[in-house]
Amino acid sequence: MRIRPFEPDDAAGVASLWQYWFRGKTRVPDPGLVELVRRMYVEYPSADADVRPLVAEDERGKLLGFLGVTAMPVMVDGEERTLAGIFPSVVDPEAPTAVAAFLLRKFLAGPQAFTFSDGGHVKFERIWELLGGSIAQMQSLRWVKVFRPGAVGLAAAADRSSALRTLAPVLGPVVRGGDVAARRAARSRLTAQPVADYRSETLAPAALARHAPELLGGARLWPRYDEAHVAWQFDQMAGIVEHGDFRAQLVRHGDAPVGWYVYYLKRGGVCRLFDLQADPRHLDAVVGQLFAEADEDGAGALIGRMEPRLRGPMNRHGALAHNGGSLLMVHSKDQSLVNDALLGRLAFSRLQGENWYWWAIKSRVVP
């Protein structure tokens, strides 16, 4: 077996593995998957020649496995380094499962300053730790803010049952009526109010690149956002329409930018947050602004990763803790960086990981 960097000609083979493991047990890939592989690993605007995806192949050149990697320039202790977000290995069903571990071991020996996986599965937890990584226990929990429990329940049931999906238009008015009553009875838990003296506006890529140093620069590690990269990523995320309406919002206190959030708004459904950053003095208000906006626009519930800095604000704003979903796995040759990651002192987010484009892979129609 040989492990080498991914090349553009590998795209169809990688797509066939994604097709088999994530979209049905066939090796004939959806054409959209092939294009998605190319966009993520060939056209990716912040690609790093030294931090690349890896493939494993046998002596005949047959693809045995793939480890996806996206790189991001970051500042670490005042120096520009590279952060790597990895998509967990996928392996040919006829190949030894150990191929996944070999790919991961090879990659973790690379030059990147920090590596994380945003979609870690419990079956990889032991392997990750044996290779020197750590599991971010708090960040592997979720917070959930519920606004319309009936709508969320109906949407979840309809996703699992074609019969309920057919009945959903009939049941919808009844469920909405129940939600109105529930929100009146539990107003403090199921509603969110606008925050005085704060307002939100569309977060333009140029604004994110411009404001990141002042809002994130106090962290030991923070992403060096480039306008072109952000524009590309926001465009890719907006194309994942099954997730909801893509939103990126800048929050101001008066005229001063104090934070931002990036999420999908799915009316009556579960809305997923991918980034929330704020000046620590305004964090509580930025969370409140996010919740008020999502509530006003009809969200069923909002969900995101728990973090040490978010525990207090989420509790005060009526969010619940949920033990479920993927793990956050972190690794660095510098153990102090790992320690700071576990304590929530590094300013990376799901925007730098693989979770956001995982939803493109799982979409009924690959965008």
Image (tube, helix red, strand yellow):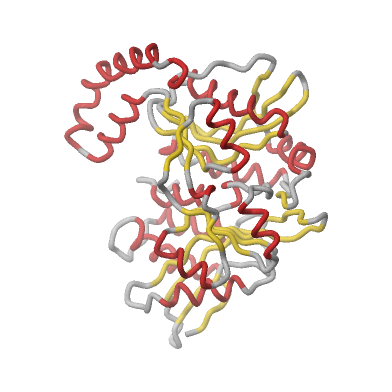
Determine whether, in the image, residue 245 is placed left or right of residue 313. Answer: left
Measuring from the top left, give residue 361's x and y in whole percent: 42, 52
Measuring from the top left, give residue 230's x and y in whole percent: 66, 44
Determine whether, in the image, residue 346 is placed left or right of residue 163. Answer: right
Determine whether, in the image, residue 110 is placed left or right of residue 130. Answer: right
For the point 54% across and 48% down, the residue is 139
Identify which residue, 320 or 252, lies in the foreground: 320
Measuring from the top left, give residue 288's x and y in whole percent: 58, 24
> Looking at this rendering, what residue extends furthest in the right direction?
78
236 vs 112: above or below: above
> Looking at this rendering, what residue extends furthest in the left direction?
163
> Looking at this rendering, what residue extends furthest in the bottom direction?
59
365 vs 123: above or below: above
For the point 67% across and 69% down, the residue is 333
Q: Quadrant of residue 75?
A: bottom right
Measuring from the top left, give residue 294's x and y in whole percent: 50, 24
Q: How many marks?
A: 0
For the point 45% across and 21% down, the residue is 189
36 vs 52: above or below: above
Q: Quadrant of residue 331?
A: bottom right
